[in-house]
Image (spheres, grey):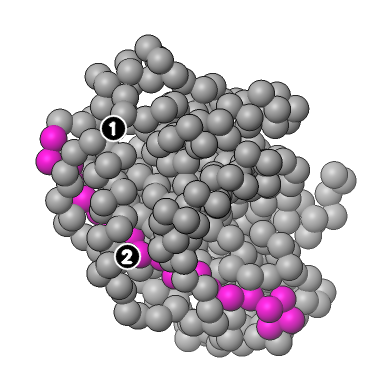
């Protein structure tokens, strides 16, 4: 009998597979598509520590960092480990970043520095000198998700002995068994990592969490100028989105200014992230739209607003080469759920868009709980 049957080959499913396989357990992973196509490959690839709120999420992000480094080295995919830059466009954003550095960063040990003056002007030959400051998140990492996850799958299969069943739909679950389009499988522990699919499996216990779906508009673009970007970029708008900053007193006047000057940014949840790919391109986004389903229709105006923000941030024009929808689970009772359903059956779900940041360590924690290991 297999030790772990895991449904879903996104970052949570793969992280559970690794956590179990590294303990010498027998693991099988089931994925309905021929390759992962959900949130874990549609994202920015940012594994952020600096944006996580103090407490569990910050602890999980810190614990996930060495796992990403180990996977990149052993599975052979590209990773940038020189941090992120959160750019302050005005005095209110700069004051918020300074308050973070002098209070929360000190109290909770965030590895971050505020760059101003000559240090800011030295970044990328002055490319970002039209900003007031930049917060350098020293331990933040970034991967190219659409390459990193397939590489991780290959490594888990070839080096860790994980058995994968792609293009295989899991149709039913009962204690000790999965019914799939590839037959019936037996296992001691079944973990469902179904992303934002709340209806195919375990629909009733998942519905009790009152989950939602978040839809995002995303772009891939080429800069029309010379830029060898080696950091993930965020803007001061991100301070209204990420828990490390959003509840600080200095965030309130910033939110008021955005509500007055650019209410469309808050209405559509636009806060601008930029991630470099290994090929000199940029992943740009995003917007946020919440509901029970992800609408298939993108608004061109939302893309235009993001392009405008990106070109101002970068100080130059960009050429869009690809557009898509990101999607992830949201709502729920907190940022994630580790849901025990019955003996030997559980679900692991993210309710926020930071699965890449915390997923590896969250799965490690979950597998340890299922095996009854001492904390």
Q: Position of residue 321 (x, y in %)?
A: 17, 56
Q: Position of residue 57 (x, y in %)?
A: 68, 47
Left or right: residue 6 versus residue 344 is: left
Q: How would you rate the neighbour count of disc 2 (Cα within 10 Å): few for under 14, some for 14-19, many for 20 or more?
A: many
Picture quarter with the C terminus? top right
Residue 61 sits in quarter: top right
Specify the segment rendered in magenta: 205-225
Would you place residue 136 above or below residue 79 in this image?
A: above
Q: Which mark is residue 300?
A: none
Instruction: Look at mark 1 in the image and give the residue it sits on.
Output: 229
Q: Are marks 2 and 1 in contact (CB under 8 Å)?
A: no
Figure quadrant of residue 253? top right
* Above/below status of 369 relative to 179: above
Name above or below for residue 268 compared with residue 132.
below
Element type at marker 1?
loop
- Is residue 34 magenta-colored? no
Query: Taking the image as drawn, is residue 99 in sight?
Result: yes
**Residue shown at 31% from the left, 39% from the top:** 313
């Amino acid at each position: 009998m297999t030790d772990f049957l895991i449904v879903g080959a996104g970052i949570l499913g793969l992280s559970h597979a690794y956590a179990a396989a590294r303990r010498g357990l027998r693991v099988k992973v089931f994925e309905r598509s021929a390759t992962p196509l959900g949130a874990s490959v549609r994202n920015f690839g940012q594994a952020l520590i600096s944006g996580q709120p103090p407490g569990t999420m910050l602890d999980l992000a810190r614990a996930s960092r060495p796992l990403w480094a180990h996977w990149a080295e052993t599975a052979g995919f590209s990773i940038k480990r020189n941090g992120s830059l959160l750019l302050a466009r005005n005095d209110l954003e700069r004051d918020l970043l300074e308050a973070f550095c002098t209070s929360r960063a000190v109290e909770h040990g965030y590895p971050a520095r505020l760059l101003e003056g000559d240090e800011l002007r030295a970044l990328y030959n002055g490319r970002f000198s039209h900003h007031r400051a930049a917060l350098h998140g020293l331990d933040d990492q970034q991967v190219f998700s659409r390459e990193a996850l397939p590489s991780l799958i290959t490594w888990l299969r070839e080096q860790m002995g994980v058995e994968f069943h792609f293009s295989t739909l899991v149709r039913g679950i009962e204690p000790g068994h999965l019914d799939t389009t590839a037959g019936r499988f037996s296992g001691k522990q079944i973990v469902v990592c179904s992303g934002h699919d709340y209806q195919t499996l375990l629909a009733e216990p998942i519905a009790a969490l009152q989950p939602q779906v978040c839809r995002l508009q995303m772009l891939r673009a080429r800069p029309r100028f010379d830029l060898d970007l080696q950091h993930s970029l965020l803007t001061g708008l991100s301070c209204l989105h990420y828990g490390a900053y959003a509840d600080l007193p200095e965030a309130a006047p910033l939110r008021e200014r955005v509500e007055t000057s650019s209410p469309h940014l808050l209405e559509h949840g636009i806060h601008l992230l930029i991630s470099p790919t290994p090929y000199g391109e940029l992943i740009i986004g995003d917007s946020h739209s919440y509901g029970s389903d992800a609408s298939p229709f993108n608004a061109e105006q939302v893309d235009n607003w993001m392009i405008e923000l990106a070109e101002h941030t970068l100080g130059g024009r960009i050429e869009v080469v690809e557009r898509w929808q990101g999607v992830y689970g949201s709502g729920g009772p907190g940022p994630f759920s580790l849901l025990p359903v019955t003996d030997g059956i559980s679900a692991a779900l993210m309710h926020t868009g930071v699965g890449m940041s915390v997923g590896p360590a969250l799965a490690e924690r979950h597998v340890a709980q299922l095996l009854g290991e001492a904390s």
